[in-house]
Image: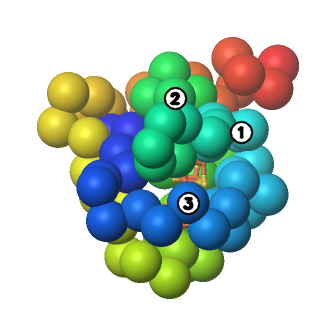
Amino acid sequence: MALLINDNCTSCDACVPACPNEAISIGDPIYVINALKCTECVGAEDEPQCKLVCPADCIVQNPDFVESHDELMAKYESLHG
Ligand code: SF4
Ligand code: SF4
């Protein structure tokens, strides 16, 4: 399942360098996660790095992108292949 940034985002920029997939970008007015690139950090880290660094606790599950661990790993490999 990809993650999603909600309206509590303060546009602090902390999450952008933390993402191993370059899935996060500046949006208007809040930052956005490209669900096609977010693997919940599967393939790179033990847990979502953006959630770890976000001071606003505004990164949540994206209900529109329900994916298994294997699917997330395949997504990671296709991004970094
Ligand atoms: S969970 Fe990982 S891959 Fe997804 S946006 Fe956050 S840092 Fe990037
Ligand atoms: S770390 Fe959190 S508050 Fe900061 S830009 Fe990313 S989502 Fe927004």
Residue 53: assigned label: none
Label 3 beta carbon within 8 A of ligand 2: yes
Q: Name, please, the residue furthest toward the left.
A: 63
Specify the quadrant that holds the N terminus. Answer: top left
Residue 34: assigned label: 2
Could you tell me the amino acid type at mark 1? Asn
Q: Position of residue 25 (x, y in %)?
A: 64, 38
Label 1 beta carbon within 8 A of ligand 1: yes
Query: Which one is earlier in the sequence, the residue at label 1 or at label 2?
Result: 1
Q: Residue at x 52, y 46 (%)?
A: 31
Q: Residue at x 54, y 36 (%)?
A: 27
Q: Position of residue 36 (x, y in %)?
A: 50, 21
Residue 11: assigned label: 3
Query: Which one is earlier in the sequence, the residue at label 2 or at label 3?
Result: 3
Of tags 1 and 2, the one toward the viewer is 2
Q: Nearer the viewer, residue 60 or 45?
A: 60
Q: CA distance from mark 2 to mark 3?
A: 16 Å
Residue 7 in which image quadrant: bottom left
**Would you name the residue on which mark 1 appears?**
21
Could you tell me the amino acid type at mark 3? Ser
Of tags 2 and 3, the one toward the viewer is 3
Is the C-beta separation of discs 1 and 3 under 8 Å? Answer: no
Query: Which one is earlier in the sequence, the residue at label 1 or at label 3?
Result: 3
Of tags 1 and 3, the one toward the viewer is 3
**Residue 59 visible from this viewpoint:** yes
Q: Is residue 38 left or right of residue 45?
A: left
Dot 2 crowding, Cα within 10 Å, few <14, some 14–19, many 20+: some
Label 2 beta carbon within 8 A of ligand 1: yes
Q: Residue at x 37, y 76 (%)?
A: 57
